[in-house]
Structures are given as C-alpha cells and as structure tokens.
Image (cartoon, helix red, strand yellow):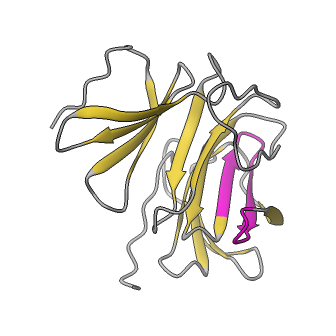
Amino acid sequence: MTVADPSNSQVNDVCVHPNEGELISCDQAGCIKQWDLSENLCSHELTPASDVPIWSVSLASDGSCLVAGNNKEKSDLPRYQAVTKISAHKKYLTRILCRGGRYLARCSADTTVKIWSISQSYEFRQEKVLQGHQRWVWDCAFSADSPCLVTTSSDHTARLWEMASGETVRQYNGHHKAAVCCALHDDAG
C-alpha cells in the first residue's frame, strides 16, 4: 500500500500505531500526520511548530502517548497545546522513542542518549544520560519489558545498555560504516 502525501514534504520518520491500521508520520514541513491504512488517507494532522521540521515520532505501545522531536529550543503551538515540552540536547536530535508510556529515550549528535521516566500525568523526569559512543547516536530500541536498550552510532558500533545501571553491557563492533538503525526482538511479552 502506498500512502501519498500531496504536500510533497520529505517524511523524516514513521511509526506503526498499536492498532496496526494506522501510521504516524512526521515531516520536513513540521507536520505530524495520522494515516488510515484502510482508506489510504490522512485522518489527522498536527502542526506543533510551523515550518520547523519534526525529525522523529514515536507512539507508546498502548497508544497512550505520542512523542515528537524537533531541533528548535522553543516553538509556537498554533493548532494544539502540548502536554509538555522538554529541552534535551544542545546538538541535533536524531531519534526519539517512547516505550510503554513509561520511558522516553532521545538520541543525539552530542553522542549521548537521554532517558526520561513518564508519570501518569505526563510529567517527564530525566533519569539517566547514557554515555560511551564516540560519535552521533542515530537510533535506539527498548527490549520488550524495558530492562535493556540497544543503540547505534556513527562510531561504527551498537551497544546494549542495562537500564537500571545505565552501563554498557555489551558493545558490538565490526561495522565498516556508521550504524544508523536497529531493532530488537527478544520474545518477551
């Protein structure tokens, strides 16, 4: 199935809704769109910061929390009011990921991954800063029950982190170029 976007803005990220009938996308024009796959159309559109590209979008596995990230410190919210805004990194955001509505991870060009806990009232509290990569961190994936996180980097490595300690459990070497994406399948849940 092809989902056509008549605005022709570059799509920066996509995630599948837990109902598996919708996609959430974000684009270069600063839009977040919800696509109905059965009807092949955009059913909702949000523009949190007009003309500020949204670089990453993620939806909690239960659909309770949508998070999106841009690289602008402050933004106007002309169409809706965000629950909260957080300023996370001084350099470029590469990926934002929400896990189970309980945790948020943000990857950055500053070589770190910052982890927040999310309360039931959607208050975000920074828990950890994962440090160890030598170059941009491009992507991350939580394990099914969230005790571990995998990250990939321009330093040609992937790392497995233990969330409780914030320490690297294992480093995967051998990539000849930047490792820019990852996925994790651990049979839990």
Query: Which region is colored magenta?
Result: 104-122
Indicate the quadrant containing the N terminus: top left, top right, bottom left or bottom right.
top left
Measuring 72% from the left and 62% from the top, which residue is drawn there?
122
In the image, is residue 154 above or below residue 78?
below
* Residue at x 18%, y 38% (from the top left corner): 39
Percent position (x, y) of residue 99?
Answer: 56, 67
Image point (76%, 74%), residue name:
166
123 on left or right of 143: right
User: Total marks drawn?
Assistant: 0
- The extreme bottom residue here reads 188
Quadrant the C terminus occupies: bottom left
Kindly tell me whether residue 44 is visible in this rendering.
yes
| 169 magenta-colored | no
The picture places residue 187, in percent across and down from the top left corner, at 35, 83
Q: Nearer the viewer, residue 42 or 59?
A: 42
The correct choice, above or below, for 107 with respect to 75 in the image is below
Question: What percent of the width, then of the height, locates residue 106?
Answer: 68, 52
Where residue 105 appears, x then y in whole percent? 66, 58
Q: Main secondary structure of the magenta part?
A: strand
In the displayed structure, 150 sits above or below 140; it is: below
158 on left or right of 185:
right
Observer-nearest residue: 162 or 78?
A: 78
Side (left or right) of 23 relative to 180: left
Q: At 73% from the left edge and 66% from the top edge, which residue is drawn? A: 121
**Residue 158 appears in view:** no
Q: Residue 106 colored magenta?
A: yes
Q: Could you say which quadrant of the image residue 47 lies in?
A: top right
